[in-house]
Image: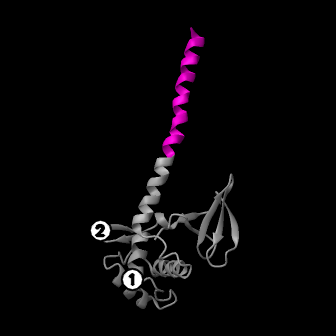
Amino acid sequence: MNLEKILAVSGKPGLYALKVQTRTGFVAESLTDGKKITVSLKSNVSLLSEISIYTQDGEKPLTEVMQRIAAKENKGQAISHKEDNATLAAYFKEILPDYDEERVYPSDIKKVLNWYNTLQAKGLVTDAAPAPAEDKEEAPVAEEKPKKAPAAKKAPAKKAAAKKDE
């Protein structure tokens, strides 16, 4: 499951897919209705790939939690986020037995389940497995190497500046 370009925008319902970056922010497309919005750099935006859930041993990435939900539900829909808090807590305890019950609130569990169901409805749960996601991460690293090459061109410029000083 690849959550690298999936966003949660504060003050806006649902999830958004990052489309284009602009000078003043970026354009995102709603996963629920497909409408595009512009989001300024001042907006509070969270990438799902950078969100973690507190556990007794530390933190678990949201990607791993969603993979556990997908495995439990055989990549189908999870229970509704509208269930009562006791049912949600019991369900989440099955998914992540060591989650920190003092720091993970019922609202957090509702949000995770709502996000999972949204992603599942759009077919994003089955698209990317962990191995292809790692391959995608390696490709940009290889692309960054040519970008560093122009830095080598700056060195002769310094030599030219040194010649002017002589």
- The label on residue 92 is 1
Q: Earlier in the sequence, mark 2 or mark 1?
A: 2
Task: State the image coordinates of residue 160 (x, y, percent, origin top left).
Answer: 58, 17
Is 149 in the magenta? yes
Q: 158 above or below 53?
A: above
Residue 129 at x, y = what percent? Answer: 42, 70
Residue in front for this viewpoint, 12 or 148:
148
Q: Which residues are magenta?
A: 144-166
Residue 48's tag is: none
Q: Could you say where residue 148 lies in the image, as x and y percent from the top left? A: 51, 38
Q: Does residue 65 appear left or right of residue 15 in this picture?
A: left
Residue 57 disc label: 2
User: What secondary structure predominates along the stretch shown in magenta?
Assistant: helix
Q: Secondary structure at mark 2?
A: loop
> Would residue 10 appear left or right of 66 to someone viewing this image?
right
Kindly identify the amino acid type of the residue bearing the numbered disc 2. Answer: Asp
The residue that appears at 65% across and 66% down in the rendered structure is 28
x 61%, y 75%: residue: 31
Q: CA distance from mark 2 to mark 1?
A: 16 Å
Few, some or many C-alpha atoms within 10 Å of disc 1 (few <14, some 14-19, many ≥20)?
Answer: many
Residue farthest to the top? 166
CB contact under 8 Å: marks 2 and 1? no
Q: Residues within 10 Å of mark 2 (few under 14, many from 20)?
A: few
Labels in figure, total = 2
Front in this rendered view, residue 17 or 108:
17
Q: Amino acid at mark 1?
A: Phe
Instruction: Determine the secondary structure under disc 1.
Output: helix
Q: Is residue 84 left or right of residue 18?
A: left
166 shown above or below 6: above
Nearest the eye: 46 or 103: 46
